[in-house]
Amino acid sequence: MAWIDPLMAAWERAMRRLAFVLGGLTLAVVVLVFAQVLLRYVLPVLGAQWGFIAMQEAVQMLHSTVFMLGAVVALHSNQHVRVDILQSRWPARTKALAELLGTLLFLLPFCGFLMVISYDYVASSWAALESSAEAGGLPGVYLWKSLLLLSAALLLLQGLVMVLQQWQRWRAAGRVAGPATDSAP
């Protein structure tokens, strides 16, 4: 399956770029929150009044973008939360099988479920070209809501990458260990 290697390399590059972009967005959130604090608590003392609904919405949109797409990067880089109490004692073949089954039985169905339940919500937002309901709010709320589908689709793709990797690890561990030392299926 030589055709998989270029796809996996492209996915790795995409994940590195996404992680870099999310780092920049995180910095933008910090700067915007700092500016909000200054505008709210420091400048009124000096007599200035500022409206910043758009800034608050920008912080919400950026933060949710970092959170939702950051889940994909965390899963990709194996930084997600898991319980390794049992896995630390398992042989490599059993670990690979547990990861494979967990991905197939939990992650992939969750991504499909998220895509199904989000589709109408996102589609109606796009149909209305939804913008903020607040006066002075941001336009393009439909783009922000599209993150539900985008993050689910990217998590699904990462899950498929993990299935391929764990399948290869399971098969490789079976060849190395042999049936006498590792009896896991």
Image (cartoon, grey):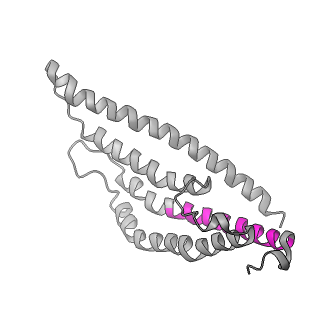
Q: Is residue 127 left or right of residue 106?
A: left
Q: Which residues are magenta?
A: 152-175
Q: Is residue 109 left or right of residue 9?
A: left
Above or below: residue 153 compared with residue 78 = below
**Can you give x and y, in whole percent of width and height, for residue 76 in the image?**
61, 56
**Can you give x and y, in whole percent of width and height, for residue 70 in the image?**
51, 51
In terms of image quadrants, where is residue 43? Answer: top left
Above or below: residue 173 compared with residue 7 = below
State the residue at coordinates (84%, 79%). Answer: 179
State the residue at coordinates (64%, 73%). Answer: 98
State the residue at coordinates (50%, 64%). Answer: 152
Q: Is residue 13 left or right of residue 43?
A: right
Above or below: residue 107 compared with residue 144 = below
**Can you give x and y, in whole percent of width and height, for residue 107 in the image?**
54, 70
- Image quadrant holding the N terminus, namely bottom right
Prevalent SS, magenta region: helix
Residue 52 magenta-highlighted: no
- Image quadrant holding the C terminus, namely bottom right
In front here: 4 or 122?
A: 4
In terms of image quadrants, where is residue 142? Answer: bottom left
